Image: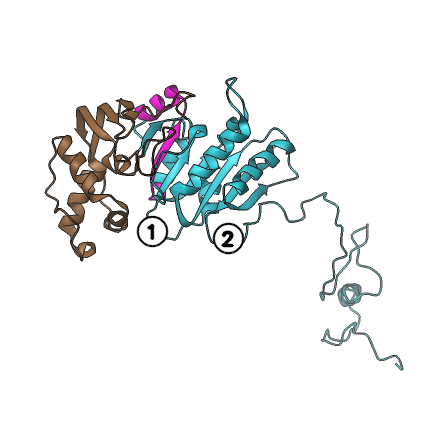
Amino acid sequence: MKLLTHNLLSSHVRGLRPGGGFPLQIQASEVRVRPVPFNAAFVARLVPRLRWAALLEAAESLGHPSELPPEPAADYEGDESFLRRVHHILLEVEVLEGVLQCPDSGRRFPISRGIPNMLLSEEEA
Amino acid sequence: MSERAVELLGLPEDRPCLLLDVGCGSGLSGDYISNEGHYWIGMDISPAMLDVAVEREVEGDLLLADVGHGIPFRPGMFDGCISISAVQWLCNADKKSHSPPKRLYQFFSTLYTALARGSRAVLQLYPENAEQVELITAQAMRAGFTGGMVVDYPNSTKAKKFFLCLFVGASGTLPKGLGTECADGEEIRQAKFTNERTRFRNAKGKSVKKSRDWILEKKERRRRQGKEVRADTKYTGRKRRPRF
């Protein structure tokens, strides 16, 4: 699971308050870094969609403290080194084994072989 | 099919987009999306298929999930959605507690939320019958989508493909299905009016008598016989004024 997916992913257990399923807390036991070709335009377009605080927290919890600023600078689109660091954190760091925990309901979603298991039981859906 | 689905998505050129692949399976459609320069996140209910995708080292990120329970993402995150041959499975009630219309509605309403304004979802499916088409389309419209079914090659049993094209927000015109122009053997229901002069040949392959073609051929024949023949001009075989 890449950190990009984690930043977009929200728990969909029934009965949560709006926005209550995000961000999922990561407890990772195996992390890997896999190089991905860099595309500045794509990363620049992603930045406004991200929840920055959640991204920084996720990177910390994986033991990959990013050298990213607390907020993206106003002119981030032209700053290639910044975009490269964002690209590395979003697309190159992958969680292979671990658990995702929903902040409101406490429901745990295991990650196995890099794939989070988001299957719900019938009562939860 | 993935090629046609991405074509129907109408994504802006030269801009890498973030797409959702519903029912990504072993990542075949995902590979096509990656080759087009886009990024994707795939969902599938089968762990076995996803394991194959992992082994094939697909570039997209994978999720094990049941889309009938919803699309678990924050609002407005995706630039588009494709699905190849997956949505019809939502019509099956695999468990006693499943209600297909409810699952379809849950899928479409959460998909609608997860897509950005102005984006599209193109879902290729194999409906069992017309009622399924009705059911699926009705739930999609209820969820807020506009659009409809695009059918490629409607007259061929083998090549016929259904693409449910759904628009979020701005409603565009529905793309035309392939093979919907008059195919060979199909009845022409309307009279065709053209300004062209039609040149006919009769059953023996000879030109119709007295037409311009016939006149030109006759003159050729006579030239070959060595007879004196007037030159061919723009006036040859032209209709004369009635008084002539």
Is residue B169 among what the camera can see?
Answer: yes
Residue carrying label 1:
B15
Report x, y in % for residue A13.
Answer: 36, 28
Report x, y in % for residue B235.
Answer: 75, 77
Say if the magenta span includes residue B34.
no
Where, quadrant-wise, is the C terminus of chain B in this rendering? bottom right
Marks 2 & 1, CB-CB < 8 Å contact = no
Q: Nearer the viewer, residue B12 or A30?
A: A30
Q: How is the image coloured?
A: by chain
**Spatial separation of the CA atoms under disc 2 and disc 1:** 21 Å
- Left or right: where does residue A96 sit relative to residue B142? left
Amino acid type, label 1: Arg
Badge 2, how many Cα within 10 Å: few under 14, some, many 20+? some
- Left or right: where does residue B227 sit relative to residue B95? right
Q: Which residues are magenta?
A: B35-55
Q: Name the subunit of mark 2.
A: B
- Left or right: where does residue B83 sit relative to residue B38? right
Location of residue B148 (image quadrant): top right
Residue carrying label 2:
B171
Asked if labels 2 and 1 share a chain, the reply is: yes
Report x, y in % for residue B45.
Answer: 41, 24
Amino acid type, label 2: Ser
Chain displayed in cyan: B
Q: Is residue B44 above or below residue B96?
A: below
Q: Name the subunit of mark 1.
A: B
Figure colour of chain A: brown
Task: Give SS at disc 2.
Answer: loop
Location of residue A124 (image quadrant): top left
Badge 1, how many Cα within 10 Å: few under 14, some, many 20+? few
Say if the magenta span includes residue B47.
yes
**Residue at image location 29% in from the left, 28% down from the top:** B57
